Amino acid sequence: MSHTHPATLAQQARNAQRVLGSCSGDTRSRVLRRLSALLAEQKGALIEANELDLRAARSAGLAPALLSRLALKEDKIATLIQGVDELAAQSDPLGRILRNTELDEGLELRQTTSALGVLLIIFESRPDAVIQIGSLALRSGNAVLLKGGSEAAHSNAALINCLRAALEAEGLPADAVIGIAGREAIAELLHHDDLIDLVIPRGSGKLVRSIQDSTRIPVLGHAEGICHTYIDAAADPSMARRLVIDGKCDYPSACNATETILVHEDFLPELKALGISLEEHRVQLIADHRSKEHLGSASAARDEDWSTEYGDLRLSVRVVCSIDEAIDHIHRYGSGHTEVIVTDDTTQAERFLSEVDAASVFHNASSRFADGYRYGLGAEVGISTGRIHARGPVGVEGLLTTRWLLRGRGQGAADYGKGKRSFRHRPLPLDEE
Amino acid sequence: MSHTHPATLAQQARNAQRVLGSCSGDTRSRVLRRLSALLAEQKGALIEANELDLRAARSAGLAPALLSRLALKEDKIATLIQGVDELAAQSDPLGRILRNTELDEGLELRQTTSALGVLLIIFESRPDAVIQIGSLALRSGNAVLLKGGSEAAHSNAALINCLRAALEAEGLPADAVIGIAGREAIAELLHHDDLIDLVIPRGSGKLVRSIQDSTRIPVLGHAEGICHTYIDAAADPSMARRLVIDGKCDYPSACNATETILVHEDFLPELKALGISLEEHRVQLIADHRSKEHLGSASAARDEDWSTEYGDLRLSVRVVCSIDEAIDHIHRYGSGHTEVIVTDDTTQAERFLSEVDAASVFHNASSRFADGYRYGLGAEVGISTGRIHARGPVGVEGLLTTRWLLRGRGQGAADYGKGKRSFRHRPLPLDEE
């Protein structure tokens, strides 16, 4: 953490990024291996720093769930080291050739991947995020400004120092990773779309929305996760029960938890049994007029229920007459996060997969699968409900942009046109020579 | 054009887009072929509508250059028809599989391309933009709200009617293309990030900046094009002359025109001859202290010259002691659009290509090549100097996003974890079964 002016820090990060983003992939791998070694060496000191935060949090009366998020024990550090080692071994995401075209003889154009630039990451409690995001940024050649919660100040500072030391040990500028302290600094940084290329707020929907409202910098994240599971007329009742219980109960506060089930009217004879199973899992049902008849202890849904992310064991239920009505409801009230159809009718399933406008659309699988690790993306930057740049669970690809590199022999644009030279536009292989 | 409330129009476009974006690629091809036929059939009526605009523009005393942009004659219509035919013949950009993974037995995840949604396009004078952008939007399954200049009102309305008629003739909702009239309507629409997914302003940097400042909706475009040509110590003098003249003079008001040349001090003995050539091309030189000695009639550069997009035949000149100083200058004053190095030294060239942080970076080619047509992208949506989503010249890819489609057999997330099932994450081939 530093008392330098925030914009100056961002400029330092910008300058450092230009070095980090244009060094070799091997160099970035070496930085990651250094980081892994440092985390192992300094394990004791990291746990001590974390103890300071934990002690303060306990005396401030933090809830047990928050204390466990804040804690950085040996097993968490081991997991972090393993993640960093995996990133170090991965092939470099920068400089990949996405498009290779011979525009004309001796005039070759390549579109290649490159780092985005400077990222501002705002996160709450969990200090492990420093290493997870910091190492992902190093792998992808980006600089990061990291703003964690004040309750984790000692832990975060110790972890940020490991990242900076790893950079310096390989002759790279430490300022590719900078810790930011204080809300005023964030407010100031959010004005600098000239210095910061992407903001990633990891936290509550409220945090995400307040940041989106106060900056012109693109924001990657999701304000809300209002996910539906539609139980079709041709749904297998036991599969429907399993998927709704997993979607709601596996981790109710997650953004990919199911908040509403839409039940086809032909499924109504099965609804009573489903309701009993859900109540056995302590799910509190909030039902529309038609479904309420089948759900003994359910309370009555109000219109705002359809657009509420409960984040707990409440679940709203609505009866629909057709798949069209289900899709209309999803488009009207959903947040474009994850939508599920349960059915044995593949025609209906394919219609749902084709027509539903959301980041993730599932057939016969729990909404809880919408997650970068489960999708096999490796480290996850976040889940985006925006449509621009990245959508759904975002891995390292979300931290990349492209550059167009043209190699010529002195050609001018005026050499081409009617009665002059014309372009070939011949595709070339994508693998490096 | 319509007097319905702008937000209602945007909602109509959203609803229409959901139909357009999920119909088959063949259907969208048929709409484009209808459009092509309609443009041919209604050529006379289109030219008549354009005559109304031209007459009003002439009596308002519009400049000849603007009149020629406004004019829609037989040859322009023929070019538009050819463009639409090419798009109709192209393979569909939607539903392409970008990633295909077996998460586990019977649990398959695909990332596929899909339309972005609703685009708001704001353009000036040229009515051909209606068809160029409208047809690109139809090809990619997007709905468009089109706001043209009032001086082209009759022409734009006639062309928008062709687009809407082509949609209706294939049983698709005409509201996938809607004309918008009036600045108040735009101001209103810019508040609706819930209804509009991307704004593409095609016009002056001033227009782009004013829109960026007044909306949370992502904006695709470039506010400025401050492009540099760096003449290295090892530059061939005749190639340097050719590239600077092409970069500056081929089309001085284009965003990819060269605004500043950075000259390595070892090249100074050649600068006088370069200056004479430029003056023969009526280029007005604005020089720093060191270069001015070699450039007889140049005026003295002030600091603001380095960040000015002249858009005319003015060119600023600065001497640098090294490639590092050139790159620093580019990062400090450039707009990240297009940067050129002229050199016969491939080591220096590769350093420049690797280190310069801009959308397009060229070796021994004119800055004027930064253009979607020249890059072989087909139709161009615009040129982006943002790093998010699309960078540099943007073709149809800039109008796409992705969806994640998961097909399962009733799996829940709680089935996986320590002591339970584990993920396979096996890559599957990308071609459709």
Image (tube, coloured by chain):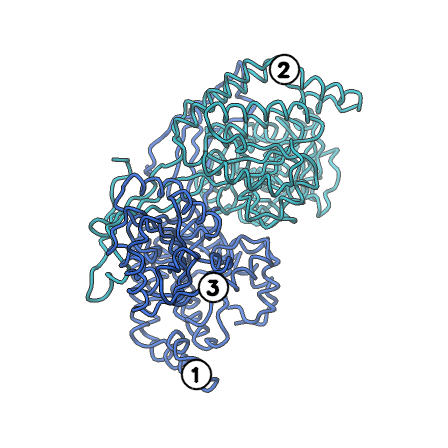
Chain colours: A cyan, B blue
The quadrant of the rendering that contains the C terminus of chain B is top left
What residue sits right under mark 3 in the picture? B177
Q: Nearer the viewer, residue A163 or A137?
A: A163
Q: Is any part of residue B166 visible from this angle?
A: no
Residue type at tag 1: Leu
Badges 2 and 3, same chain: no
Q: Are marks 1 and 3 in contact (CB under 8 Å)?
A: no
The label on residue B52 is 1
Q: Are marks 2 and 3 in contact (CB under 8 Å)?
A: no
Which badge, 1 or 3, comes first in the chain's sequence?
A: 1
Q: x and y percent of residue A345 in the render?
A: 46, 38
Q: Nearer the viewer, residue B312 or B393?
A: B312
Q: x and y percent of residue A397 in the render?
A: 45, 37
Q: How many marks can you see?
A: 3
Helix, strand or loop for disc 1 = helix
Q: x and y percent of residue B154 in the render?
A: 46, 77
Q: CA distance from mark 2 to mark 3?
A: 62 Å
> Horizontal placement of A107 versus B321: left or right?
left
Residue type at tag 2: Ala
Q: Nearer the viewer, residue A354 or A3?
A: A3
Q: CA distance from mark 1 to mark 3?
A: 23 Å
Question: What subunit carries mark 1?
Answer: B
What residue sits right under mark 2 in the picture? A45
